[in-house]
Amino acid sequence: MSIELGTEAPFFELPGVDGYDHSLDEYGDAKLLVLVQSCNHCPYVQAWEDRLMAIARDHAHEGVRVVALNSNDVSSHPEDSFEQMKARAEKRGFPFDYLFDEDQSLAHALGAEHTPEVFLFDEERKLRYHGAIDDSRDETTVTKSYLRDAIDALLAGDEPPLAQTDAVGCTVKWK
């Protein structure tokens, strides 16, 4: 069960594919923080990856930080290993931090269930949107851009038009 709207972002300190550890405090100057439960192998993550990269690029100048988290058990899914994460991030040119939650503590704290699954926190680090990136795995049939709409609303000082949607994707691979 994922955390409830209004809940404060859980603290984390995790290694990133860039060779540095990243913590919640590091993103303190961000107007909005988007944590996305992600991984390498999931076809749903792969389908939404370009759109997530575009969101990160489009909103970076507005103080929005996107951070992808991989919490999958690598013993059952070796393609999600830290080394493979580094290779994928380099190959794809991720415009966001990609962090390894090896002990799955952040995934548990968020109550994450799927990949991809979005947790959008406001400037006070309260959860304001949770769910899917948009309404279609197929980019050509997107009719509702949930995450973009929530970001735009929060940046304008408004409430997200939808605060919660169902995340669609693979399940988090628990140990």
Image (cartoon, rainbow, N blue to C red):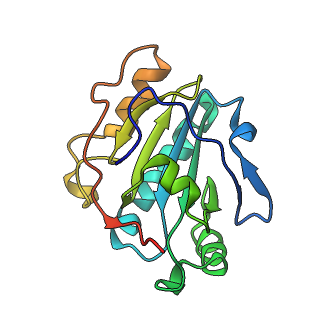
x, y (%) of residue 66? 56, 45
Q: Compared to 60, does 67 lie above or below?
A: below
Q: Compared to 65, does 77 lie above or below?
A: below
* Residue 53 appears in the rendering: no
Q: Residue at the spot x=59%, y=24% of the render?
A: 123
Residue at the top extreme of this rendering = 157
Closest to the observer: 151 or 75? 75
x, y (%) of residue 114? 36, 60
x, y (%) of residue 5? 39, 30
Question: In this rendering, would 27 be left or right of 150?
Answer: right
Q: Residue at the spot x=40%, y=65% of the render?
A: 45
* Residue 90 appears in the rendering: yes
Q: Compared to 44, does 166 lie above or below?
A: above
Q: Residue at the spot x=46%, y=52% of the render?
A: 52
Question: In this rendering, would 130 be left or right of 64?
Answer: left
Total label count? 0
Closest to the observer: 106 or 95? 106
Q: Residue at the spot x=47%, y=83% of the render?
A: 77
Residue 8 sits in which quadrant?
Answer: top right
Question: In this rendering, would 9 be left or right of 139?
Answer: right
x, y (%) of residue 4? 38, 34
